[in-house]
Amino acid sequence: MDNKVYYGEYSLDYWIELMLKLDITMPEYQRRFVWTKDQVEKLLNSMKNKEFIPPIIIGACKQDGDSHNYIIDGQQRLTAILFAKIGFIIDPKAWEKDTEKFLSETINEGEDDEDYDSSSIVWRYSNLLDTKLKNNTIDQIINRCKSDKRYIPFSFNCENDFFEKTYLGFSYLLPQDDNEIEQHRYYSTIFRNINFQGTELQAEESREALYFWNKKRTYWFKPKFAQQIQGKTKNGIAHMDFVRYISILSDYNKLNSNKSLLFKGYKLIWEEYYDQYIYSVAQDSDDAKFGKFSVLFGSDKAAEELLKRVNQAIVNLDLIKDNYETIIKMDIYFFGLFYFLLFQNGYFDLSKKAELLIELDKKWQNYDEKHRRSPGAKKYLRDRVQDSVDIYRKYFIKGE
């Protein structure tokens, strides 16, 4: 892509004006605000002392036909500036914990209780703005903060003209390709490669940048029922990672349900595995490992109907219930269900619901400690996939 890049700098006052007028916004895959109060103060002091601050990266991008100026890198810095201007900062303990954690194994060892950091909060500076207004004001934001106990006073001692006379640079990216998917691919790649002040992307934040490659397929990666199915970790509650299930089952299906070949011949690095699957779905490529999305599931409308069928089966089987004690249990309950409903086109005999649930519960409880200690180990995961499929096969009725 033949792209253009422009460089310049704006005063802090002008950066704030751009945020308030929504002239710059954040794409949906942008990470949450993750800086501590100390990091905010460190940045502001660096500006006061005229130290070098990396420029903000803004990108021109189309979304559903509309033009936007997206913040590709710089949300943390711009938010810190806004905090200093309004005299308030978020109280992290008062905001709900991150509900975007996935109940999944870690990258290598697969320890069930080593999940993502639960200290992240679901907050971006856009929470301070009324997105229906094209011109928010500082006074409006201050009044909102005063009436919301989740914000606490924040005092930064600076000269009266600090925001007027302090400048922060920018790089403005202007893609020459008008194709929305190509633009999103370009920006999501940039976003995933950026790491400022050592605050690394969490796995799910990195994945969301990939979803942006084909925003219309996000429904497939984050179905609503997956957000409702939760399990316990030592850091709290985490929801089901549907990408994990559907990528493994696509691999399993491509191998004609031969569990012995699943993951064979290469070292599993889970996020790379999931990334490969997300790429293949977003691009609808005929991936050697996972197959072609449109061949497997048809049009997007047909795929969404399949997910509705899955959701209904989950409701009928009462599988959205108390938190799953471990990913071992969740695997037994869902690998087979997803496999038959999504890849085999059918339904389950609900008259035998009680027998099915008893068998599923008995199976996961009979697994030895090795499964629980290393749920991400390939040999144990293969067993759980096959065991779940074998159980559900007894209750599956092939569709016409």
Image (spheres, rainbow, N blue to C red):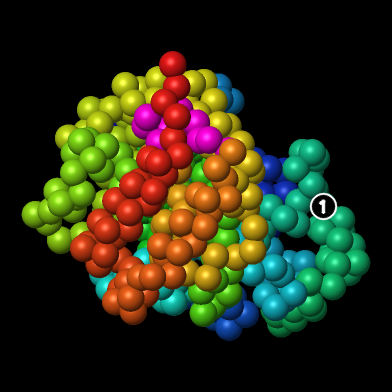
Q: Which residues are magenta?
A: 340-350
Residue under numbered circle 1? 137
- Mark 1 residue type: Thr
Position of the N terminus by quadrant: top left
Q: Position of residue 200 (x, y in %)?
A: 40, 68
> In front here: 46 or 111?
111
Q: Position of residue 49 (x, y in %)?
A: 53, 80
Give the answer, above or below, for where 41 lies relative to 277: below
User: Is residue 346 within the magenta segment?
Assistant: yes
User: Is residue 128 within the magenta segment?
Assistant: no
Answer whether residue 338 is visible to the viewer in this image: no
Residue 149: image quadrant is bottom right
Q: Most extreme residue toward the top, as rendered?
A: 400
Residue drawn 46% across and 57% down? Answer: 360
Residue 286: image quadrant is top left
Q: Most extreme residue toward the left, as rendered?
A: 265
Give left or right: position of 182 versus 233. left
Position of the C terminus by quadrant: top left
Give the answer, above or below, for where 367 lies relative to 209: below
